[in-house]
Image (cartoon, grey):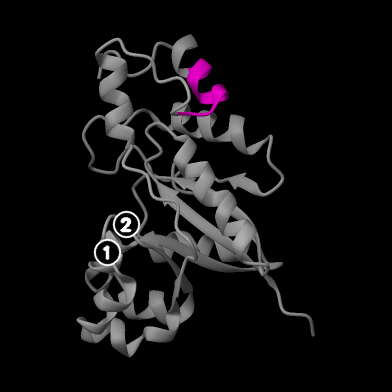
C-alpha cells in the first residue's frame, strides 16, 4: 500500500501573516517530498494574547494568500470553536477531516523547550511527527539532549533543513502600523491591501 502523504500543520496567531510565514511554509513543501501541503491554522481569538485581532480578519488574510498557492490551505477548525483547543484536540479533528493524509505538526525550538508541559504531551509526540524549526541561535539536538522527555521521544522530532530565519515578527509589523510607517514588502500584497482597506491595527 502506498504511504499517505503528510499534511504539515502550521498553527499560530498570524496577527498579521507575514512574508516569512509563507516563505517558511513553501520551504517545508520544497524540502520534504512526502509533505504534500501546509495547512495554516490560526488560533482562536479567545486565546489569551494581547492585541489579537478578530478571528475573521486573520482567517481572511491567510485565505487571500493560500487561495493563490496550490501548496497552501487554511483551516477555521480552531476559530469556530467556543474555546481555544489544545493542540492535540486540533490535530485529532484535522486527522478526521483529512483522511487521505497523515498529520504532522510544525513548531519552533521555543515551543520544543516547553512541549513536555503541554496537555497530553506524551500522546501528542507519540502519535504525530513534529517538524522543528530552529529559532535564533537554538540547536534542536542540544535542546533534545538536555531534556529527558524529548530524549525518550527523539524519533518524533524532525529538524527542518536550511531554515529561513527572520527577526521580523508580527508585533514588529503591528508597531510599524501604529506609528504610521509602511509595512509594504513585510507582508504579501494581499495582506497589505486588506489591512489598509479595513484600517486594521491602528486602534489596538
Residue 47 is situated, as x and y percent measured from the top left of the image, at 29, 44
- The circle on residue 138 is 1
- The circle on residue 52 is none
Can I make out residue 89 in this image? yes
Residue 30 is situated, as x and y percent measured from the top left of the image, at 64, 58
| Magenta span contains residue 147 | no
Q: Residue at x 26, y 77 (%)?
A: 142
Q: Residue at x 30, y 25 (%)?
A: 174
Q: Secondary structure at mark 2?
A: loop
Mark 2 → mark 1, Cα distance in angstroms: 6 Å
Q: Secondary structure at mark 1?
A: loop
Instruction: Between residue 109 and residue 73, name the one nearer to us.
Output: 109
Q: Is residue 194 above or below residue 53?
A: above
- In the displayed structure image, the side of residue 85 where residue 9 appears, left or right: right
Majority secondary structure of magenta residues: helix
Q: Is residue 31 above or below residue 61?
A: below
| Magenta span contains residue 189 | yes
The answer to whether mark 2 and mark 1 are in CB contact below 8 A is yes
- The circle on residue 135 is 2
Q: Residue at x 33, y 80 (%)?
A: 122
Q: Residue at x 60, y 63 (%)?
A: 31
Residue 54 location, quadrant? top left
Can I make out residue 76 in this image? no
Neighbours of disc 1 within 10 Å: few (<14), some (14-19), many (20+):
few
Neighbours of disc 2 within 10 Å: few (<14), some (14-19), many (20+):
some
- In the displayed structure image, the side of residue 136 where residue 61 appears, left or right: right
Q: Which residues are magenta?
A: 187-194
- Quadrant of the image for the C terminus? top left
- In the displayed structure image, the side of residue 199 where residue 120 appears, left or right: left
Amino acid at each position: 500500500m502506498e504511504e499517505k502523504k503528510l499534511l504539515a500543520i502550521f498553527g499560530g496567531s498570524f496577527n498579521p501573516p507575514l512574508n516569512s510565514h509563507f516563505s517558511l511554509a513553501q520551504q517545508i513543501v520544497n524540502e520534504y517530498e512526502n509533505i504534500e501541503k501546509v495547512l495554516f491554522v490560526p488560533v482562536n481569538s479567545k486565546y489569551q494574547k494581547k492585541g489579537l485581532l478578530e478571528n475573521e480578519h486573520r482567517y481572511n488574510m491567510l485565505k487571500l494568500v493560500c487561495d493563490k498557492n496550490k501548496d497552501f490551505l487554511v483551516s477555521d477548525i480552531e476559530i469556530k470553536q467556543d474555546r481555544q483547543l489544545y493542540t492535540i484536540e486540533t490535530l485529532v479533528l484535522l486527522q478526521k477531516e483529512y483522511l487521505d493524509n497523515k498529520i504532522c505538526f510544525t513548531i519552533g525550538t521555543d515551543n520544543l523547550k516547553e512541549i513536555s508541559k503541554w496537555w497530553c504531551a506524551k500522546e501528542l509526540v507519540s502519535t504525530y511527527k513534529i517538524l522543528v524549526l530552529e529559532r535564533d541561535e537554538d540547536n534542536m539536538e542540544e535542546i533534545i539532549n538536555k531534556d529527558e522527555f524529548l530524549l525518550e521521544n527523539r524519533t518524533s522530532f524532525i529538524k527542518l533543513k536550511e531554515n529561513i530565519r527572520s527577526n521580523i515578527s508580527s508585533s514588529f509589523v503591528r508597531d510599524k502600523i501604529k506609528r504610521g510607517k509602511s509595512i509594504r514588502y513585510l507582508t504579501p500584497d494581499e495582506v497589505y491591501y486588506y489591512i489598509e482597506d479595513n484600517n486594521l491595527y491602528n486602534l489596538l
